[in-house]
Amino acid sequence: MPGDGIGPEVMTEVRKVIAWLAEHRDVHFDVSEDLVGGAAYDVHGVPLHDDTMAKAQAADAVLLGAVGGPKYDTLDFSLKPERGLLRLRKEMDLFANLRPAQCFDALADFSSLKRDVVAGLDIVIVRELTSGSYFGEPRGIFKEGNERVGINTHRYTESEIERAARAAFELARRRSNRVCSMEKANVMEAGVLWRDVVTEVHQADYADVELSHMYADNGAMQLVRAPKQFDVILTDNLFGDILSDCAAMLTGSLGMLPSASLGAPMENGRPKALYEPVHGSAPDIAGQGKANPTACVLSFAMALRYSFDLGAEATRIETAVEKVLADGVRTADLLQAEGDTAVSTTQMGDAIVAALTASL
Ligand code: NAI
Ligand code: MG
């Protein structure tokens, strides 16, 4: 689902990678394309058509570009492009949001932190996505005596914590086998339960994984002080929102950041899954060939790894991106010095494909 703005532009570059895999690696995907966001509203009058929703539910994985744009700002809340994305996440019950923060060596000087602190960084934040402060009831703004009171409820059930924890432990087993769980058990009961349930799941089924706990505020400090101490960070929806944005910025541009959102296993054993770049539709650069397609390409690589057991091909794509950056190929968002020249979206995609071919 390419979506809006730069979504279709970056998706075009992913198609090149898909074609390359078919031609050179004998890996073939049954790809169908559909509308989401403003693009769907323009045709169907809704940001996600029921038929599209059904196709998403039946797919092994959904890859989404981005949604939104100023053209749709005045629409009723229920028709806004973002609602299409929210519907996908909700109906597919995508409870585990995976946000990698990986620092490609060639971009280490692009970080706001010192090169030593971030070079070689490779961590993933697993954020619980469907519960906690953003969903708990009661919520609202109420009148209390002669003043207003704003209420949100930080609510977590055991089963919600358990499934997020399992997702983090499973992920850790595919990586360096370490999970650090973050909450505020010192001041929040929901945090105490979080720590208890994560510990129980660990003891019962994942004793081989190294588990540690940290208060989320300390976690924020550690992320900017010494981020390489982590492998997988497991945290709730609210803390995860903030910690994942913080971790993401350690590595530089939005144009580089992929994500995955995973749900319960389907009949074929694969998790329901939606892959998308972290960035939005970037209306300021849409239609100009300036978008960096890397975030979407890396999101597709995550799909290969987590939905199709093609980890080696995923690594091949990540290595190709690394090589392209090392060769100095930069889209406009990655320019550092005055006088550097930028390549277009298409040229970046072509460079990644050329690096793939060179890897054979
Ligand atoms: P944005 O991520 O679209 O853009 C923020 C800034 O980063 C802009 O200056 C943009 O040009 C730049 N940028 C983003 N992606 C880039 C890429 N691949 N290559 C080069 N530069 C890139 O966020 P913004 O401006 O807050 O939102 C724009 C629209 O996107 C809004 O309608 C918003 O609701 C929507 N949005 C959609 C998301 C999604 O589909 N998941 C996520 C965030 C925003
Ligand atoms: Mg956020």
Image: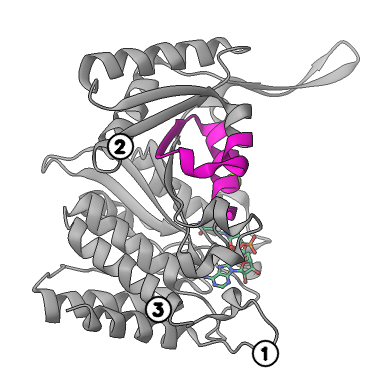
Query: Label 3 amino acid?
Result: Val
**In the image, which disc is placed on residue 339?**
1
Residue 158 screen position, x and y as percent = 38, 15
| Quadrant of the snapshot with the C terminus | bottom left
Nearer-N-terminus badge (3/1): 3
Q: Pick whichever, 199 or 91, lies toward us.
A: 199
- Residue shown at 56% from the left, 49% from the top: 78
- Magenta segment, prevailing SS (helix, strand or loop): helix
**In the image, which disc is placed on residue 324?**
3
- Residue 254 located left or right of residue 316: right
Nearer-N-terminus badge (2/1): 2
**In the image, which disc is placed on residue 172?**
2
Mark 3 close to ligand 1, CB under 8 Å: no
Residue 16 screen position, x and y as percent = 28, 80
Q: Is residue 79 visible?
A: no
Query: Label 2 amino acid?
Result: Ala
Up-down relation of residue 287 to residue 205 (above or below): below
- Residue 19 located left or right of residue 268: right
Up-down relation of residue 31 to residue 129 (above or below): below
| Quadrant of the snapshot with the N terminus | bottom left
Label 2's element? Answer: helix
Structural distance between the alpha carbons of marks 2 and 3 = 28 Å
Query: Label 1 amino acid?
Result: Gly
Structural distance between the alpha carbons of marks 3 and 1 = 19 Å
Label 1's element? Answer: loop
Mark 2 close to ligand 2, CB under 8 Å: no
* Picture quadrant of residue 338: bottom right
Bounds of the magenta span? 221-250
